[in-house]
Amino acid sequence: MKIKLLVVVILIVVAISPVKAEEKVIKIGLLDAVEEVSLEVESGFKILDIDHKEKSLPQSRYKITREDGYLSKNGTGYVKEERLFFKSAQSNELIEVNGRKYRGDIEVLNTTDGLIVINHVKMSDYLASVVGSEVISSWPTEVLKAQAIVARTYALRNLNKYQSRGYNLSNTVKCQVYRGVSAETERIIKAVAETKGQVLTYNDQLISAVYHSTAGGKTANASTVWNGNSPYLQSVTSNDDLSPHYNWQKEYTKTEIEELLRANGLEISKLKGISLKGVGPSGRAKEVKIHAKNGEYIINGSHFRFWLGLKSTNFSIIGENIMRFNGLDDRFDFTYNWFNQEYNLTPQKRYLFRGYGWGHGVGMSQWGAYQMALAGANYREILKHYYTDIEIGENKEDSGGIVDEG
């Protein structure tokens, strides 16, 4: 590939001016291992050079592409840089990343896996988007406050989760959903501000502030879902029957389940049955036992849930032999003449999964928090209900994130 020189010197080291503790910057991974990204800002971009000085770029829209390890802006000037750092020319102007608007600055890392796109954003702005992405913005203020404190605690405890990738947290359900300014509302921004710096602790340590959509009547012990036991993540009642995910069901044939199990590395010859092991007080199974012709297999309950696309591990299984007519399905064993038409007919094994809730079931149920707020509970009562024996207070060491390390 022919290499062209860039006129503009590219940033290698990033410098961030000192800011107040509650407004320190965290790094959110927006895209990871991609080959291109589009950036746009109305007033135009500034880029930081090797001496930490800002230089203006001539255009307000750039498409950063990667080819054979080299970077290009708008298809010109291939360079082997490790990092590009973009700021808006006007202070506090929003930057679009693939059409979605974000506050703060955008960093593009050039790695052997592809481009990593990172949003450098203030903790308060990050939390406003997370709260709006995770719960319904029109819900009672006490729910928004509870979610803000939980989200802040989760973020601060997990700041090193993606350190090897150059950022603190992802923007997906693997951490917390973050959708930029599109998720913000004035009510949410106010709820974040009114709970500024507040976190959840147990024995003066930040807790693992996990949460989920719907418990289905009772949350799960952490020990049922994951290895180890957390004294503050215990099974508690959860009145969340207003949730559209309170109960659900999903049906599979025996053949379909066999195919799903094999697709996930379980080489079973023929499925004979499924049973649940280690069912906790919330009704969730820690493990699922697969009975097959060539042996028995023990699967983690959460893994089984994801393999089959079930909403939670809180389910029971009903197995039935059924007879079905289907002139379009060729999986049947013998034919049957019905009004001079040939139809295939065979007994099929069907598994019906009937369950409750959506998510892992540990920690705060968001729909449960909603119903508690409707009943008059404040955010402190909501949090103390779902997290056993915790304290709610200010994070004295850092009430708003980490100092950006560049």
Image: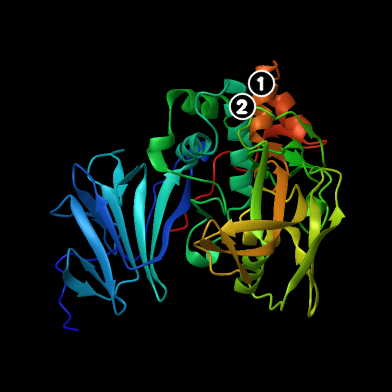
Q: Earlier in the sequence, mark 2 or mark 1?
A: 2
Picture coordinates of residue 99, whole percent (x, y)? 29, 47
Q: Residue furthest front?
A: 340
Q: Position of residue 37 (x, y in %)?
A: 30, 59
- At horizontal 60% and vertical 42% (from top left) the residue drawn is 398
The numbered mark at residue 143 is 2
Q: Is residue 391 above or below residue 3?
A: above
Label 1, secondary structure: give it: helix
Label 2 neighbour load within 10 Å: few <14, some 14-19, many 20+:
many
| Amino acid under disc 1 | Ala
Question: Foreground residue, 64 or 332?
Answer: 332
Residue at the far bottom: name it: 1
Q: Secondary structure at mark 2?
A: helix
User: On screen, 366 above or below 57?
Assistant: above
Give the CA separation, mark 2 to mark 1. Answer: 6 Å
Q: In this rendering, would 234 be left or right of 77?
A: right
Which residue corresponds to mark 1? 373
